[in-house]
Image (spheres, coloured by chain):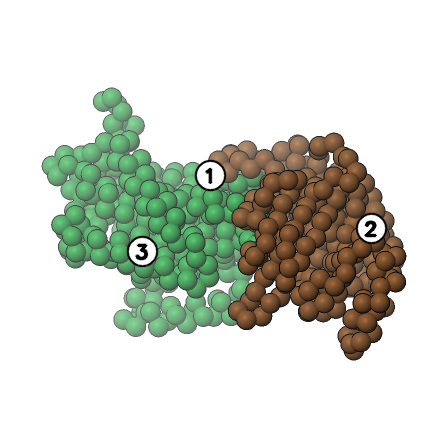
Chain colours: A brown, B green
């Protein structure tokens, strides 16, 4: 892992626009993510948050705009290539390999860093480095007690933690997390917030989240989107006080899930 | 079921099959030999269908290419050397699978099924309609390859018993090879791709390469089966590449239970046995066969491979009462 310096810009998106036919899902969205920061994308349903995160992760090519990662233009890279340079993501809907054990899920993620498609005679379960790394990442994500469980039987919250462990195992410098707290109880949610704070120490995190309490508990920076447009970007205090944000939310029936 | 408990029935089955030549009946030796060849073919397809999630409907192409290769590469009036024609035939099938894979693996789902079928039909017509294949009558392999190594002959493929054990040895080797491959990092990635390819990509896997590797490997092993078929029967026809054959081997895999090597072998046995038995009963045997396959899909979703587990659960359920 490279040296961690504060205020180092990891990810920079400039004027991203995405059209689906005539629909403009994202228009001129610019986001900057620094190391040791949690940047939250906020907005009502349909605001275009998932489209935005999909463009950053490479799941969706932008119609216009550029994306830079640590100074390098990565706009043309595929999702797999972006994972290789250090951008990891989790999905809004839990996206694990349910028939595998927790360890195997994360081991498979770790194995992606040293791909040797030609090694068809070695045993995957004897790759010590991958197993050790997987165990460390499971511990870091707070799932230490569940290492040998079949992942499909974990609680919803634990599966979200597993997703994070998988992203960590890919050495990601940037974590793109799409609603990691969705569907969690208050206790699970609180422990996830602790995990996020711990991960922030060495990485940059971009979060899409609805849970307002959690958002203001962890956010260093908040970008508010409405109807595919960027409404306001700033520290939590500024967003809380913003008249524009209040109007955007209070003016519509689609409340903030407070 | 733990590894040792499942090993014993497998060894017993292997021993029973190995006793077939003791019967001395050419008919049984040849027909069981053919089933063993189809079992290798079914395992090669299971690598794609059951473990990687790629439903190929054109797998007969690789079977047929290697079968034709040995017939074409062998000189007309003398035996070719086994240690040359075997790797050459398998290599040609693997090469064809690699090149075809470059195209078909860019598609998914129903499109993948259709383009694999289309390429297999192209291969069918190449052997059916060009001077290369000898038309719809096919081509004879007049002399079975000789296993001679610098004058020493470890076995003789013109001897039906030797041929039988050669096929059986290949089946065991292919089984052990695939079992090993599936435990390797490569094999684990294939299973991950079957489960969720998109997730594998977001984890940084270049899944195309792995799928191409699996497709080529399956083509090579399908080629081995085709090679053995040609040597066993001494002639090849374009029908070996027809979509019926691609469908039959797919049915074997489904009957046996996808994603289970032993199941693929059992599926090949069940399929060929039903073909023999039903054909004795009626000329409409395909009707009966179709009924059985529908029943298996409805009532045994795990195929034959799921049967031991079901029996075990049923017995345990009985004990509890």
Q: Helix, strand, or loop for circle 2?
A: loop
Q: Is residue B107 visible?
A: yes
Q: Disc 2 sits on a residue from what chain?
A: A
Outermost residue, left side = B77
Q: Residue A232 placed where, x, y %?
A: 77, 61
* Residue at the (58%, 45%) spot, across then down: A74
Mark 1 Cα-neighbour bin, 10 Å: few <14, some 14–19, many ≥20: few
3 vs 2, front mark: 2
Between label 3 and label 1, give the one nearer the viewer.
Answer: 3
Q: Nearer the viewer, residue A211 or B260?
A: A211
Residue at mark 3: chain: B
Q: Is residue B223 left or right of residue A190?
A: left
Using the rendered view, name the quadrant where residue B106 is placed. Answer: bottom left
Q: CA distance from mark 2 to mark 1?
A: 53 Å
* Residue at (81, 66) in percent of width and height: A245
- In this rendering, the answer to whether B91 lies above or below A163 is above
Give the labeled residue for mark 3: B119
Q: Which residue does the numbered mark 2 point to in the structure image?
A: A220
The picture quadrant where one finds residue B86 is: top left
Who's the residue at 45% across and 70% down the image? B294
């Amino acid at each position: 892992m490279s040296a961690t310096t504060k205020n180092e810009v990891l990810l920079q998106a400039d004027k991203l626009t995405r059209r689906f036919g005539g629909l403009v899902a994202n228009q001129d969205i610019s986001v900057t993510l620094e190391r040791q920061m949690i940047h939250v994308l906020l907005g009502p349903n349909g605001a275009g948050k998932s489209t935005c995160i999909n463009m950053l992760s490479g799941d969706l090519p932008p119609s216009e705009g550029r994306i830079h990662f640590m100074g390098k233009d990565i706009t043309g890279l595929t999702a797999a290539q972006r994972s290789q340079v250090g951008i990891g993501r989790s999905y809004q809907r839990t996206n694990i390999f349910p028939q595998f054990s927790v360890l195997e899920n994360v081991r498979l993620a770790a194995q992606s860093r040293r791909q040797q498609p030609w090694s068809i005679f070695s045993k995957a379960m004897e790759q010590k480095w991958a197993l050790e790394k997987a165990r460390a990442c499971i511990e870091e994500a707070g799932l230490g007690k569940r290492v040998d469980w079949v992942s499909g039987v974990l609680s919803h919250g634990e599966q979200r933690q597993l997703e994070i462990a998988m992203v960590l195992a890919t050495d990601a410098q940037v974590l793109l997390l799409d609603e990691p707290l969705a569907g969690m109880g208050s206790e699970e949610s609180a422990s996830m917030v602790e995990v996020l704070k711990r991960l922030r120490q060495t990485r940059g995190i971009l979060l899409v989240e609805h849970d307002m309490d959690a958002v203001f508990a962890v956010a260093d920076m908040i970008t508010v989107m409405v109807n595919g447009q960027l409404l306001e970007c700033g520290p939590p205090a500024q967003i809380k006080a913003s008249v524009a944000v209040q109007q955007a939310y209070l003016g519509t029936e689609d409340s903030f899930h407070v | 079921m733990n590894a040792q408990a499942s090993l014993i029935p497998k060894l017993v089955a292997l021993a029973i099959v190995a006793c077939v030549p003791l019967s001395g009946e050419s008919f049984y030796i040849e027909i069981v030999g053919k089933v063993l060849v189809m079992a290798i073919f079914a395992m090669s397809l299971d690598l794609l269908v059951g473990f990687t999630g790629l439903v190929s409907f054109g797998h007969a192409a690789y079977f047929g290419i290697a079968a034709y290769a040995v017939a074409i590469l062998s000189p007309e009036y003398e035996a070719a050397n086994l240690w040359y024609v075997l790797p050459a035939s398998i290599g040609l099938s693997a090469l064809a699978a690699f090149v075809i894979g470059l195209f078909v693996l860019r598609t998914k789902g129903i499109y993948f099924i259709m383009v694999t079928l289309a390429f297999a039909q192209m291969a069918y017509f190449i052997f059916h309609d060009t001077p290369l294949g000898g038309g719809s009558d096919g081509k004879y392999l007049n002399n079975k390859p000789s296993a001679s190594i610098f004058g020493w002959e470890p076995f003789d493929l013109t001897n039906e018993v030797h041929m039988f054990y050669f096929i059986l040895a290949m089946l065991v080797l292919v089984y052990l090879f695939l079992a090993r491959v599936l435990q390797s990092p490569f094999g684990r990635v294939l299973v991950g791709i079957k489960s969720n390819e998109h997730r594998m990509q977001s984890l940084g896997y270049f899944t195309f390469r792995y799928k191409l590797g699996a497709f080529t490997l399956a083509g090579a092993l399908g080629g081995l089966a085709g090679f053995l078929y040609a040597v066993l029967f001494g002639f090849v026809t374009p029908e070996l590449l027809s979509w019926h054959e691609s469908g039959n081997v797919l049915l074997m895999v489904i009957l046996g239970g996808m994603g289970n090597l032993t199941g693929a072998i059992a599926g090949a046995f069940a399929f060929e046995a039903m073909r023999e038995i039903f054909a004795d009963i009626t000329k409409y045997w395909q009707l009966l066969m179709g009924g059985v396959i529908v029943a298996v899909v409805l009532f045994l979703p795990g195929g034959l491979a799921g049967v031991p587990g079901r029996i075990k659960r049923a017995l345990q359920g009985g004990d509890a009462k």
